[in-house]
Image (spheres, rainbow, N blue to C red):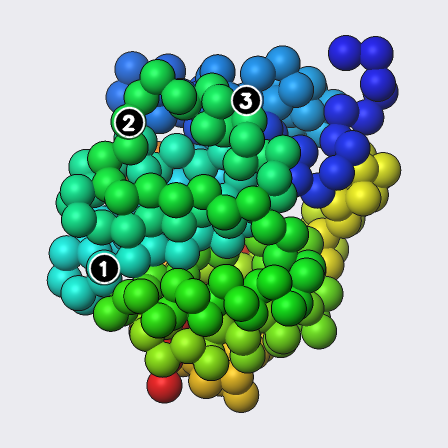
Amino acid sequence: MTDPNPIAHVSDTAYWVASYRATESERPEALFSDPFARRLAGERGEAIVRALPKGAQMGWPMVVRTAVMDEIIMRTITKDDVDCVLNLAAGLDARPWRLLLPPSLRWVDVDHPAMIDYKLSELSATRPACDYEGVRLDLADAAARRTLFARIGADARRVLVITEGLLVYLTTEGVSELARDLYTQSSFGLWLTDLASPGLLKMLEKSWAPVLRGGNAPFRFGPAESTKFFAPFGWREVEFRSVFDEGLRLNRTFPFARVWKFLGRFAGARRREEFRRFSGIGLLQRT
């Protein structure tokens, strides 16, 4: 690619994350199998990984995020009576094609028209495992977003909302508005999201900021109060998975991570909790 910055729009980060899923899927002992990821990521995904400092080495948090979210999604569908999944800013996520989902499950992907069109074109030869709908919509359009939520909410009994890799790109005001809009639908019972912290944003600012800002995709949202941020909008935490701890469990982490884990035992309780919530995956429930 001739463009020195392969990220032209925030939605291009979907190619980047798909490249990490492809690399993991090709490992002998992969945590998950995404046979579509390499094709979906294409050259653009590989170019983004190359453009980011230590891009290849820093893929493990996205891999851990995918594996943990897969686990929580399958569990909530089975045990929490979820009949609809609403995946916001779905990007190149191929879960409806790669997971063993119930045929009766309704899965709704929402993203920019070009992203939905590209994904469906690339996956046209394969049928999704469930009742799938791709919605072409810019989530920044508040009126269109609320209309969509009302339509989905009216047709479902219990919805699991997913915002994987979305909130970090929004402003605090944008996340607040989204949380309010989701809460207006009584059938939206669960919300699964990844969550950054101020410390993580500061660390990433030093390494990846030039590339991401150049593509109009800066990291913005990392609340100091972690999932408590959502409480005023009607959402409470029912589960939190530390990406660091899950990386150790899944054997996908950075060098000397276990040394850091050992040294952390000597820190105070507050400091340990801050480190645990440095980066994580939270399952929120409607209050």
- Residue at image mark 2: 127
Residue occupying the point 62% across, 57% down: 139
The three-letter amino acid code for the residue at tag 3 is Ala
Mark 1: few/some/many CA within 10 Å (<14, 14-19, 20+): some
In space, the residues marked 1 and 2 are separated at their CA atoms by 19 Å
In space, the residues marked 2 and 3 are separated at their CA atoms by 19 Å
Q: Is residue 31 left or right of residue 1?
A: left
The three-letter amino acid code for the residue at tag 1 is Asp
Q: Which mark is residue 41?
A: 3
Which is more foreground, mark 2 or mark 3? 2
| Residue 83 rendering spot, x and y as whole percentages | 23, 59
| Residue 32 rendering spot, x and y as whole percentages | 30, 30
Location of residue 136 by image quarter = top right
In space, the residues marked 3 and 1 are separated at their CA atoms by 29 Å
What is the secondary structure assignment of the residue under circle 2? Answer: loop
Q: Earlier in the sequence, mark 3 or mark 1?
A: 3
The answer to whether the residue labelled 3 contacts the one labelled 1, judged by CB atoms less than 8 Å apart, is no
Mark 2: few/some/many CA within 10 Å (<14, 14-19, 20+): few
| Residue 226 rendering spot, x and y as whole percentages | 54, 72
Q: Is residue 207 visible?
A: no
Q: Earlier in the sequence, mark 2 or mark 3?
A: 3
What quarter of the picture does the C terminus occupy? bottom left
Q: Which mark is residue 83?
A: 1
Location of residue 202 by image quarter = bottom right
